[in-house]
Amino acid sequence: MDEQQYKVLKALNEATNRMDINMFAKKVNLNPNEAIQQIQQLAREGFLQKVGSGYGITAKGKTALKTLTHVPNEMGFEFYFALDQPADLTADNLEEFYMVVKQINVGSLEFHLYRGDFESWLKEAIKDSELAYNFGTLKATSLKGEELREELLKTLDSKYCIQELL
């Protein structure tokens, strides 16, 4: 999903009243034809569905919003390799988190998982206790290396279908 689609989806989610296409287009900084095209594309991709004469956000759309919405700067997840060894990588939403998990040295993943850092961030910053719990259960598997990375990615994808958004 690109930035413009995210902006349209977010605006539709935040709308409290019905508004005509001109008002909506102005809200998302598009002309009416561009706004209609974006809405139709989001509907084709399953993020929106036709509801009467308008559109409503689907479960897939709500999941995408949750995945792409940034946490406040001070709540971003800062990756480390070990104590006092920052990796200089921060994730401010679940999509960024997924991308870092895909690429960072597996030692960092082991460090954070077995300390409970991922669980804490998912529960406190992302507000997803279920995903935090699922990450916590991975500790009991004692996975290491690429197997751990694969399970972390699979756990994220099973709830948020992040791979589909990329």
Image (cartoon, rainbow, N blue to C red):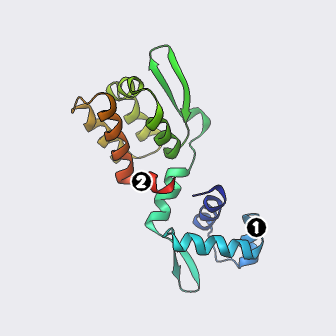
Q: Secondary structure at mark 2?
A: helix
Q: What is the x, y in percent for residue 166? A: 52, 52
Q: Residues within 10 Å of mark 1 (few under 14, many from 20)?
A: some
User: Where, by quadrant of the figure, is residue 22 drawn?
Assistant: bottom right
Q: Residues within 10 Å of mark 2 (few under 14, many from 20)?
A: many
User: Where, by quadrant of the figure, is residue 148 drawn?
Assistant: top left
For residue 36, side relative to residue 116 (left or right) = right
Say above or below: 140 vs 123: above
Residue that lies at the very extreme toward the top in this rendered image:
84
Residue 30, numbered circle: 1
Q: What is the x, y in percent for residue 91? A: 53, 37
Residue 160, numbered circle: 2
Say above or below: 84 vs 161: above
Q: Secondary structure at mark 1?
A: loop
Q: What is the x, y in percent for residue 88? A: 57, 24
In the image, what residue type sits under mark 2?
A: Tyr
